[in-house]
Image: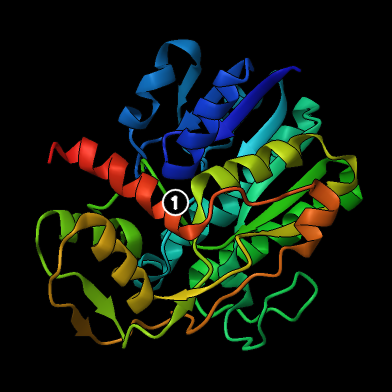
Amino acid sequence: MGTILVTGGGGFIGSNLTVALVKLGHKVKVLDNFSTGSIDNLQPVLKEIELYKGDLRCLDDVRRAVAGAEVVFHQGALPSVPRSIADPLTTNAVNIEGTLNVLLASRDAGVRRVVYASSSSVYGSNEVLPKVENMSLCPMSPYAATKLAGEVYGKIFYELYSLETVGLRYFNVFGPRQNPKSEYAAAIPRFIKALLNKASPVIYGDGNQSRDFTFIDNVVQANLLSMQTCAAAGEVFNIACGKRITLNGLLEILMDITGTRVDVVYTAARPGDVKHSLAGVEKAAGVLGYCPKTDIKEGLRLTVEWFTKESGL
C-alpha cells in the first residue's frame, strides 16, 4: 500500500482515521489548517506522520500534500449547519472549492482513489424513512448544499477523468476527540460536557427529534473498506447504524451512564435542522461489507469514559 493523505486530519473524524491508519502500518500524511481541528488530536501519532499545515482553499497547498499519495481521504471541511447559515460564503469556499481542489490535485497527481466525507444532511426535508441513497435529495442549509455539490463533483471526476471516488454520507457521528467547546458543537459532546459539570444540557426544540447516531469506530471501518472495495468506485453510501433515538432518549442514557440527574433546558428549534433521520445501510453492507460493530449505548459509554478522562473528573 502506498502513501495515504488525510485532509482535515486534525479534526474529529480525520484524527481518528489517521490514528487507525498508522496503527495498521500505513504511511500517512495529514493536511489541515487547524481552524476547527486540533494538533492535540494527532499527538498519539505526531512523530509517525508527515504533517502539512495548509488550507483547502489554496490549490498549491493541496497539491503539495497530495503529491505521492495513492489514496486520499478527504475529511477536511467547515462543519455545522448553524455555522453555514451564519456564514454561507466561507462554508462554500472551504467545502466546495476545497473539495474541487482536492479532486483536481488528486487527478493530476495520479491518485488511485479519493474517499470523501458527505453528510446525511443532503436528504434534508425529504420525510421518508429510512433514508436510502437513490431517494430525492432536499438540502435545507448551505452546509447541506456544499456536501451535495461535493458528491456531484466526485461523480463527475469519476465519469470524466476515471479518478475513483467514493462518497460516504455520515449520520451524526460521535465519539472521542469530538470538540465540545465550539458554539457549533454537536449534541453529544455538549450534553456530556454539561452532565460532567452537573449543568443543565440545552436541547434545541422539544427533544423528540430523532437521529441515527453513529459511533466513530463504525465510520473509520467504513472508510477503510471504501479504500479497497473495487465495486465502490463512483458510488455514495450511507454510513450509520440503521437505528434512531430521540434527543430526549439519548439524554436519558447519558444521565444513566454519568450518574447525573439534572433538569433539561429546552429552547427554540434551530433553522435548517432536520426533524427525523434514519439511515438504510443495506447498500454499504452489500457493496462494502460494512457492519456497524458498536451500538449507541456502548458508543456513548466509551465516549463518556474518554471525556471523563480528558476533563480530569
Q: Looking at the rendering, in which quadrant would you find the N terminus?
A: top right
Q: Classify residue 60 as left or right of residue 168.
A: left
Look at the image and tell me whether residue 186 can be seen: no
Q: Which image quadrant is residue 130 in?
A: bottom right
**How far across and how far down the image is residue 307, in percent?**
26, 44
Q: Classify residue 55 as left or right of residue 125.
A: left
**How far across and how far down the image is residue 55, in percent?**
46, 37
Viewer-proximal residue among 161 and 233: 233
Circle 1 SS class: helix
Q: Looking at the rendering, in which quadrant would you find the C terminus?
A: top left
Viewer-proximal residue among 115 and 309: 309
Q: Residue at x 30, y 71 (%)?
A: 252
**How far across and how far down the image is residue 88, in percent?**
43, 68
- Which residue position is annotated with label 1? 299
Q: Residue at x 63, y 37 (%)?
A: 73
Q: Residue at x 44, y 51 (%)?
A: 299
**How far across and how far down the image is residue 290, in percent?**
73, 49
* Way the structure is coloured: rainbow
Look at the image and tell me whether residue 77 can be seen: yes
Q: Classify residue 146 as left or right of residue 33.
A: right
Q: Amino acid at mark 1?
A: Gly
Q: Residue at x 37, y 66 (%)?
A: 87
Q: With respect to residue 215, does 87 lie above or below?
A: below
Q: With respect to residue 191, does 6 lie above or below?
A: above
Disc tally is 1
Q: Residues within 10 Å of mark 1 (few under 14, many from 20)?
A: many
Residue at the top extreme of this rendering: 47
Q: With respect to residue 271, does 240 lie above or below?
A: above
